Amino acid sequence: MRTAAIELVVNGTRRAIASEGEASLLSVLRDEIGLTGAKYGCGEGQCGACTVLIDGVPRRSCITKVWSVAGKAITTIEGIERDGALHPLQEAFLVEDALQCGYCTSGMIVSGVGLLKTNPHPSDAEILEFMEGNICRCGTYPRILAAIRRAAAGNGGVR
């Protein structure tokens, strides 16, 4: 296996990592950088627990090769808050009690932030369609929908 220096931009910070280019972005984020908010769920890009934003677009980091995101803006759940203040969607998740075991929460929030960046005031149908690939094993979908709706009602959760 060949290891190469790859430059990543994670949560606004440039990081040079020495990694196998075929490694998953998830494994690099968790094992090499120490950002453990994105979770390993299915390993097939189907559950959404590993979701991060790549140039503002939600992507499954478990199936994203690290070489493919070199130089792109990667935002994890750890990078969504600003200056110690939670993102409006993070606040809404707390207010709506939209988490139970918490395993899916970071992926849900990151996906929701991606939605609100492109569609600040989505309808319920648009939220459901966009969030379809994120699985909550605890079944808190009505509260997740309410949280996204709450963030959108504020200022669209955009900042």
Image: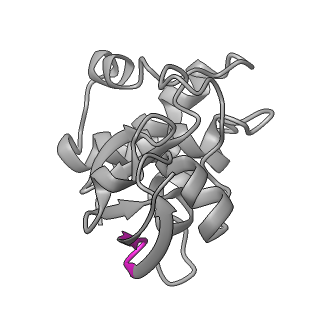
Q: Is residue 70 above or below residue 150?
A: below
Q: Is residue 135 left or right of residue 140?
A: left
Foreground pick, 117 / 63: 63
Q: Is residue 143 above or below residue 28?
A: above
Find residue 154 and report its horizontal and vertical position in percent. 36, 53
In this view, the residue farthest toward the left is 118
Residue that appears at 60% across and 50% down: 27
Find residue 9 and report its horizontal and vertical position in percent. 35, 72
Main SS class of the magenta portion in the image: strand
Find residue 26 and report its horizontal and vertical position in percent. 55, 48
Q: How many marks?
A: 0
Picture colour scheme: one colour
Whether the magenta-drawn stretch holds residue 12 is answered as yes
Residue that appears at 74% across and 20% down: 138
Whether the magenta-drawn stretch holds residue 3 is answered as no
Q: Which residues are magenta?
A: 8-13
Q: Is residue 145 above or below residue 55?
A: above
Foreground pick, 89 / 3: 3
Please say whether residue 47 is visible from this viewpoint.
yes
Q: Is residue 104 left or right of residue 132?
A: right
Q: Is residue 113 above or below residue 82?
A: above
Quadrant of the frame with the C terminus: bottom left
Residue that appears at 40% across and 41% down: 64
Q: Is residue 12 left or right of residue 45?
A: left
Residue that appears at 60% across and 48% down: 38
Give the quarter of the image for residue 128: top left
Foreground pick, 93 / 112: 112
Find residue 11 and report its horizontal and vertical position in percent. 43, 71
In this view, the residue farthest toward the front is 1
